[in-house]
């Protein structure tokens, strides 16, 4: 599918459209801190990741989850992010011509809400499996873009003396642009990871991820050039994960 | 109504008895009629008496026929008043070790949803540990076997050594199998063997559902 769009772009247009970039290998660090108070779990998350074209992604997420019950949690967050490439970042410079602008220093503010059901898959071998469907809506105040993130997470918890000791997770995430773009899904992630629970307060882990994203022309671009395009790029990510927990662990 | 049901019906064990406390730790109370007293080593627990354990507490009862009952934390266990001598577990969980000479009289666990005929020598019985599951009964066998008969359809299930079952409140018994929760149970019944405290939580479902990392 990705190749198809790359081909479409390269065959139909030339010169002033973005080239399909080769897959890049990058690294990422995610640090999360939870403060658990009864049914509330306050969360602070910091992410830093390398990207193609020497762009650096950085974000901080602040907010809280509320556990409606054992199977449902809802979250409300504020996010500040840098280094996100949007469709309208393909711009014409008077000196260098058309190109992606570097957004590493551009801050964007987002409001995020999510609602996530979680199931216990006790029928699977080992019994200690969960499946979560994270449904996250985000509104970007920078360009008014709205996205829906759907993430499915299958987790196996290895218990030792009845306490989680290690857990393994497989995640698939799809991003649906709600009010822009031409693709129903413009970003996808697949994660495979492991987290070691060093103590009730400290968890350390690693993950490998593969990501794919697409960008489409803006109406401004079409008006100026008469062309349209959809281009895609992918990346492979090796990540480190640190999770700190405070408050009530019961 | 559910709470009343739990308190009134509880788990009943057809059994003979009186006994004595031969080991305890933490907050343990012996209730006789309207009076309660802190547990003492050697204290007699007679017909109709109850033994209550607090948080992080434990009591061992040596019964008159040699059976040993380990009462885990936050539990309440009553020695029978009736002539047929039934033990009642009103809350929490117990480990029971029944010597062969005491097995001439079959042990039975009665619940609203099942009758459990204990043929084994060592088994564990527990109520659910939170509001949602407190009327559920969990049972597993360490030695011997147990016959479980659901009251709903009188279907009999034989539970073998190492296997466990769940009897959900008012529902049928689950198929016996080697449940994950049975692996962590502390079956030690003799203080000389070391730590007797059972730290295993039966309902790990809640634990993993509430486990957040994302």
Image (tube, coloured by chain):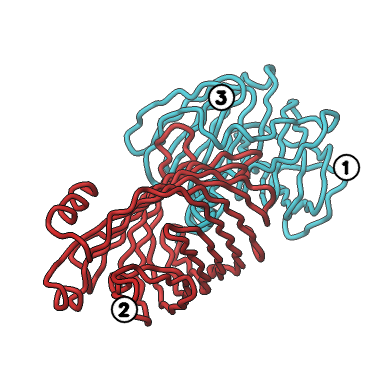
Residue furthest out toward the right: B41
> Could you tell whether A175 is left or right of B49 in the image?
left
Label 2 to label 3: alpha-carbon separation: 77 Å
Residue at 54 percent across and 54 percent down: it is B211
User: Which of label 2 and label 1 is nearer to you?
Assistant: 2
Q: Are marks 2 and 1 in contact (CB under 8 Å)?
A: no
Q: Colour of chain A?
A: red
Question: Label 1: chain?
Answer: B
Q: Is residue B63 visible?
A: yes
Q: Nearer the viewer, mark 2 or mark 3?
A: 2
Is A52 above or below relative to A99?
above
Q: Are marks 1 and 3 on the same chain?
A: yes
The residue tagged with tag 3: helix, strand or loop? Answer: loop
Question: Which residue is tagged 1?
Answer: B41
Residue bearing the label numbered 3: B162
CA gap, disc 1 and disc 3: 32 Å
> Which residue appears at 56% of the width and 69% of the height?
A44
Q: Colour of chain B?
A: cyan
């Amino acid at each position: 599918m990705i190749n198809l769009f790359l081909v479409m772009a390269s065959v139909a247009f030339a010169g002033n459209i973005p080239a399909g970039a080769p897959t890049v290998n990058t690294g990422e660090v995610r640090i999360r801190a939870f403060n658990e108070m009864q049914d509330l779990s306050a969360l602070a998350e910091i992410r830093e990741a390398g990207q193609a074209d020497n762009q650096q992604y950085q974000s901080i997420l602040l907010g809280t989850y509320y556990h409606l019950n054992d199977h449902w949690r809802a979250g409300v967050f504020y996010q500040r992010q840098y280094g996100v490439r949007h469709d309208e970042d393909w711009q014409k410079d008077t000196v260098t011509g058309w190109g992606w602008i570097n957004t590493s220093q551009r801050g964007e503010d987002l409001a995020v809400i999510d609602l996530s059901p979680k199931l216990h898959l006790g029928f699977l071998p080992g019994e200690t499996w969960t499946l979560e469907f994270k449904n996250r809506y985000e509104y970007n105040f920078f360009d008014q873009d709205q996205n829906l993130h759907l993430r499915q997470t299958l987790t196996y918890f290895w218990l030792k003396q009845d306490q989680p000791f290690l857990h393994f997770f497989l995640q698939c995430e799809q991003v649906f642009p709600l009010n822009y773009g031409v693709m129903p899904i413009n970003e996808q992630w697949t994660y495979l990871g492991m987290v070691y629970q060093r103590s009730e307060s400290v968890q350390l882990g690693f993950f490998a991820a593969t990501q794919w994203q697409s960008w489409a022309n803006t109406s401004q671009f079409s008006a100026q050039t008469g062309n349209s395009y959809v281009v895609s790029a992918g990346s492979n990510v090796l990540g480190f994960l640190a999770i700190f927990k405070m408050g009530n662990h019961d | 109504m559910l709470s009343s049901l739990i308190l009134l019906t509880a788990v009943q064990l057809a059994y003979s008895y009186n006994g004595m406390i031969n080991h305890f730790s933490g907050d343990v109370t012996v209730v006789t009629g309207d009076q309660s007293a802190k547990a003492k080593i050697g204290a007699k627990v007679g017909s109709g008496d109850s033994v209550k354990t607090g948080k992080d507490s434990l009591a061992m009862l040596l019964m008159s026929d040699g059976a040993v009952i380990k009462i885990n934390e936050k539990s309440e266990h009553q020695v029978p008043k009736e002539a047929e001598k039934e033990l009642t577990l009103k809350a929490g969980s117990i480990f029971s070790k029944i010597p062969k000479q005491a097995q001439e009289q079959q042990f039975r666990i009665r619940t609203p949803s099942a009758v459990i005929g204990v043929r084994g020598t060592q088994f564990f019985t527990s109520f659910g540990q939170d509001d949602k599951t407190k009327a559920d009964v969990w049972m597993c066998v360490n030695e011997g076997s147990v016959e479980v008969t659901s009251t709903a359809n009188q279907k009999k299930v034989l539970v073998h050594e190492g296997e466990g079952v769940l009897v959900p409140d008012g529902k049928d018994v689950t198929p016996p199998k080697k449940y994950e929760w049975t692996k962590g149970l502390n079956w030690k019944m003799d203080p000389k063997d070391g730590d007797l405290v059972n730290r295993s939580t039966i309902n790990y479902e809640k634990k993993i559902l509430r486990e957040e990392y994302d």
